Image: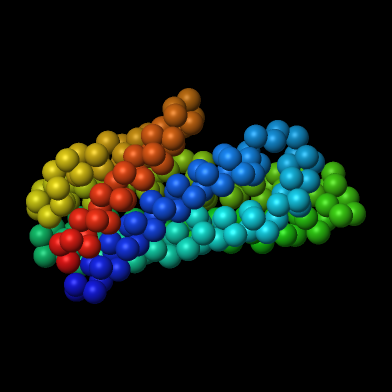
Amino acid sequence: MNKLQRMGGLAALYEAAAYIAGMVGFLLIVDVSGVTDPVQKVAVMAENKGFLYLMHLIIYVIWGIFMVVLSLALYEREKENLPSVSKLAAIFGILWGCVIIASGMIYNTGMLKVIDIYETDPDQAATVWLAVDAVFSGLGGGTEILGGIWILLVSLTALRSGSLPRVLNILGIIIGIAGIASVVPVLAEILIYIFALGQIIWFIWLGIFLLRHE
């Protein structure tokens, strides 16, 4: 169990680091989301395909793998205290991780295919990308309901059992509610930012705690 807790702590720290890397990479280095014209967006992707492929590998595919590890570590920690709720939390955590993995793979595979089409038919490439992007957004961040449910369940379970710091659990409950409420379109943009920024703090705190209390 101690080894799994250590792996969970390292996984939580990776999740936070990947969030920070994504914010720096997509806001300061290549801001694809800031390009509104579909053809121009594909052109930007073609110019930066190596960077974009690596970023989506780091912050989606690998991130999702570590989420599965973290979910199992937290389940092992809580299964004796609240077995039913902790099992439900683990299911949502693993599901969230798998969805994030799938979205990253869809983005990278779709991007490479669209770039190939762009070389001969930019308009068709833009049309294909709109379809790929819709699927990617739906899975990987259009809303944060799966992540919100997972963090909420983990925090409520730990608050009940006292296995994690109380303030960390309260923060997790707030973040979880924000993630779930992001399904409301008018609130989605601001709540997703709150969810993402809050998670960085939550993951770092959780990771350090798990490493110190194996």
Could you say where residue 122 lies in the image, as x and y percent from the top left?
Answer: 85, 47
Could you say where residue 203 lies in the image, as x and y percent from the top left?
Answer: 31, 50
Horizontal relation, residue 209 to residue 7: left or right: left
What is the count of numbered marks? 0
| Residue at 64%, 55% in the rendered image | 51
| Residue at 63%, 58% in the rendered image | 53
| Residue at 21%, 47% in the rendered image | 155
Does residue 145 appear in this view? Answer: yes
Horizontal relation, residue 79 to residue 178: left or right: left
Q: Quadrant of the C terminus?
A: bottom left
Q: Is residue 182 above or below residue 83?
A: above
Does residue 127 appear in this view? Answer: no
Could you say where residue 16 lies in the image, as x and y percent from the top left?
Answer: 38, 51
Front-lying residue, 133 or 163: 163
Horizontal relation, residue 44 to residue 54: left or right: right
Q: Is residue 39 above or below residue 7?
A: above
- Quadrant of residue 74 within the rendered picture: bottom left
| Residue at 25%, 53% in the rendered image | 206
Front-lying residue, 26 or 100: 26
Could you say where residue 78 lies in the image, as x and y percent from the top left?
Answer: 16, 61
Q: Quadrant of the N terminus?
A: bottom left
**Extreme residue in the top direction:** 186
